[in-house]
Image: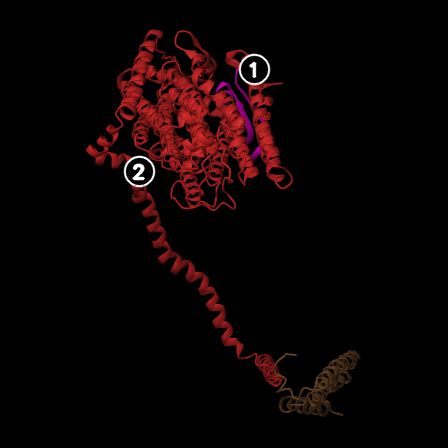
Amino acid sequence: MNISWYIVLSALLFTIGAIGILVRRSPMVILLCLELMLNAGNLALVAFSREVGNAQGQVFALVVMVIAACEVVVGLGLIVAIFRRKLPLDVDDLRELRG
Amino acid sequence: MTATSWAWLVLLFPLLGSITIALSYRLTSWRFAGIVGTAAIALAFICGIGALICLLGEDPEARHHASSLWEYASVASLQIKLGIYVDPLSVFMVLIVSGVSTLIHVYSFGYMQSDEGYHRFFSYLNFFVFSMLLLVLAGNFVLLIVGWAFVGFASYALISFWYRRTTATRAGMKAFVINVVGDIGLVLAAFLIFQQLHTFDYTEVFAKAPQVFHTNQWTVTAICLLLLVGAFAKSAQLPFHTWLPDAMEGPTPVSSLIHAATMVTAGVYLIARTHVLFVLAPTAADIAAFVGLATLLVAASIALVMTDLKRAIAYSTMSQIGYMVVGVSIGAYSAGMFHLMTHAFFKALLFMAAGSIISAMANNQNIDDMRGFGKAMRFTSIAMLCGSLALAAFPGTSGFFSKDEILAYATQRGGMYLIFTVLGYAGALLTAVYTFRLVFRVLPGRPCKEAQELIDTGHLAHEPPRNPASGEEEDTDVGFPGAEHHIAEQAPSMKWAMAVLSFLALFAGLVQVPGLDHMVTNFLAPVFADSPLAAIEPSTGASWVGLLIGAAISVAGIGIAYWAYVLRPEVPGKLIERFGWLHTFLYNKWYFDELIDVLVVRPALAIGRFANRTFERFVVDGLVTGTGETVREAGSVVRAVQNGLVRTYALLLLVGFAALALYFLISSS
C-alpha cells in the first residue's frame, strides 16, 4: 500500500485537531483535540517506520503515547480542579491565573 | 626592656582603655569609666617615662630606634610598616601628651560627674590620647596620616559631644572639614615624598632627602608647603584657624586637652619632625614663620576684645602656637618645643580654671557678667592667676623663659629675622594685656550675682541651662552636662589636677634657664643635630638681655591692663567709643569667617548647586531614568501578546511552526 495514504490521513487528523483547539473553548474538547494531534503524529511515525523498515519510529510512537497519557492525567486533573472551584469551563473566561 | 617596647605599651594602654569603657558602658558605673580612663593614660605616661629612661641610658648619637610590628601593606616596591620611631623628640611629645592628658582626665573625673554621657566622654578622650600618641610615635608618613586623621575624628566627636546643641554639632563639622583640608595637604605631601624618594619611612626619607633635593628645588618646596597646609589646619594658623574658637562649644576639659595642650600643637611637631625638609626649602620655612607671626598678632588682637571667656583663651592659644610655629620654622627647634611644653601646662590650667568659673556661672561664658570671683572661688582664682602669669610671661614663670628663647634665637639669626623679635615682643605686650584683661575683669571687684550666692550660701547658681552661644534653652535629657555643675573648690580631683598644673606653669621654665641649665635643648639636640640652623645659639648675655626686655614688656602689659580695667574702668568704654570701627573689626574676628564664606563656602555651594541643576539632573538622572524608561517602553510593546487567551497562544504556535516548516521546505528544495 502506498505510504501517501497514511500520510494524508495523518495530516487530516492533525488539521482537525489543530482546528478543534483553535475554535473550541471547552478545555475537555481541547484536550481531546490535543490527543487527536498526537495520534496523527503517531500514525505518521509508524507509517514511516514501516516504509523505512526499522523499529525506531515505532519506539518513538510508544514514547509519545506515554507522554500523551501523562499529559491527559495533568489536563484532566486541571479540569476537575477548575470544576471543583465552580469556575466556568471555558478557556476564554479563564484568562487570568488568579485564584 | 627597650625604648621601643615601652613605646608600644604607651600606645596600647589608651587604646585598651577606650575599648574597655566603650564596651562596658551598660555594665559599669561612671566611677569605673573615670578610673579606667585615667589609669590607662597614667600607665601610658609611666611607660613614656620608661622609654625616657631607656633613651637617657644610651649614647646621645644612638638615641633613635625604629620598630615595626607587621607590614601594613606590601605591594611591588611599596612597603608600609606598622612602625614607630622612638627618638628624643617623639618621647618628649609622648611625655607632654600623656602627662597633661592624665591631669586633664583627673580633672574631667570631677568636672563631668553628672553628665549623661560620662562613659562616652572618657572613651572618646582615651581614643583621642591614643590617636595623638600614634601621631607622635609614627615611624612613617602613612602611620602619621592615620594618627592625624584619628585625631581629627576624635576632635570632631568631642566638640560635638553635647550633640543636642546645634551650635556644637555645627562647630564639630566645621572643625572636621577644615581638618580634612589639612589632611589632604598632608596626604599629597606624602605622595610627593614617595614619588621623589620611593619610601615613606622617616629614617630613609630624612637620609635620602639631602642627596636627592638641592636647596629650594621646587619639589621640596611643594612638599613643605603641602605639609604646612596640614600643619596649619591642625594648629589653627591663618587662614585655617576659624574652627578653633568655635571648637569651644565642646566641654571644657576637651578645650583644655585637645584645643590647647595637645592636638593643636601637632602642626608644630610636624614641622619639627620634618625639619630636614624645611632646611632644604628655606622659602617654605620663611613662609611658615611669617604665617605664624601673622597668626600670633591677629589672634592676640582678637583676644583683646573677645567677651566669651573660653573663646578669648582659644584666641590666645592660636597666638601662642604662632610663637611655636615661628620658633620651629626659623630654626629655634628646641625653643619651639620648649614653648610647646610650657604652653601645654599653663594653657591647660587656664582652661581648667575657666571651666570651674563657667560652672559657677551656670554655663554662662560671658565675662561681662562675671565679677568678683577672687573672693568666691579662692583656689580657682589662684590657679587662674598662675596660668595667666605664665601666659603673660611674667618674670620667673614658665612662659617667660620659653617665649623669650624663641625671640632671642630670632635676634641671634639676625637680618630679616629681627622682624620676628620686634613683632614677637609686640605680641608679648598684647598677650600680657589681654590675659590680665580677663583676670582683672573676672577676679576682683564687687561679686556678681552668682559669685555672691556662692559666697553667701556655698551653692552654685542654678538656672535653666542655656546655650552660651545662641542663648537657647538646652535639651537636658541627653547629651548635656547633668543638672549639677562642679567647681574646683568642691571637687577634689579637679583641685589636684589644677594644683599640679599650677606648679608646673610657674616652675617648669626652670628646666631651661639661659646660662644655668639646658635640659630640653640637650635632650632634643641629637634630633636636630643634622640641621645647620641648630648650631646658631644666642649667647647667654644676649639671652638675658632678651629676658629683661621680655620681663619689662610683660610687667608693662600687666600694668596697662591694671590701669585700664581696675584703676580707670571707664577707659575701655571710651576707647570703644573712640575707635568703634576698630572694635567692630576686631570683635568680628577680622571678618575671617565672612571672608572664607565668600571666597570658599559660597563658590563651593554655587558649584554644587550648578552641578546639581545640570550634570546631576540631565546626565546622571538621564542615564538612570533613561534605562528604566527604555525597559518599560519595550515591555509595553510586547505586553499585548500576553493576553491570557490560550487559543491565541496556540494559534501563534501553529503559525510559527507552519512558517518554520515552510521555510525548511523552501530552503531544502
Q: Amino acid at mark 2?
A: Phe
Res. B579 mark? none
Quarter of the image with the C terminus of chain B in it: bottom right
Numbered circle sitting on residue B592: 2
Relative height, residue B648 to residue B412 (above, below): below
As drawn, the label of residue B53 is: 1
Instruction: State the residue in front, B356 or B374.
Output: B374
Q: Quadrant of residue B620?
A: bottom left
- Which chain wears red? B
Q: Position of residue B542 (x, y in %)?
A: 32, 9
Q: Amino acid at mark 1?
A: Ile
Mark nearest the camera among 2 and 1 is 2
Residue under the point 62% across and 87% down:
A93
In the picture, one chain is brown; tell me its letter.
Answer: A
Residue in view at x 53 percent, y 39 percent = B115
Q: Secondary structure at mark 2?
A: helix
Q: Which SS does the magenta portion mostly show?
A: strand
- Report whether A4 appears left or right of B287: right
Which quarter of the figure has residue A90? bottom right
- Measuring from the top left, give residue B194's x and y in whole percent: 46, 32
Residue B124 position (above or below residue A4): above
Marks 2 and 1, the one that precedes in the sequence? 1
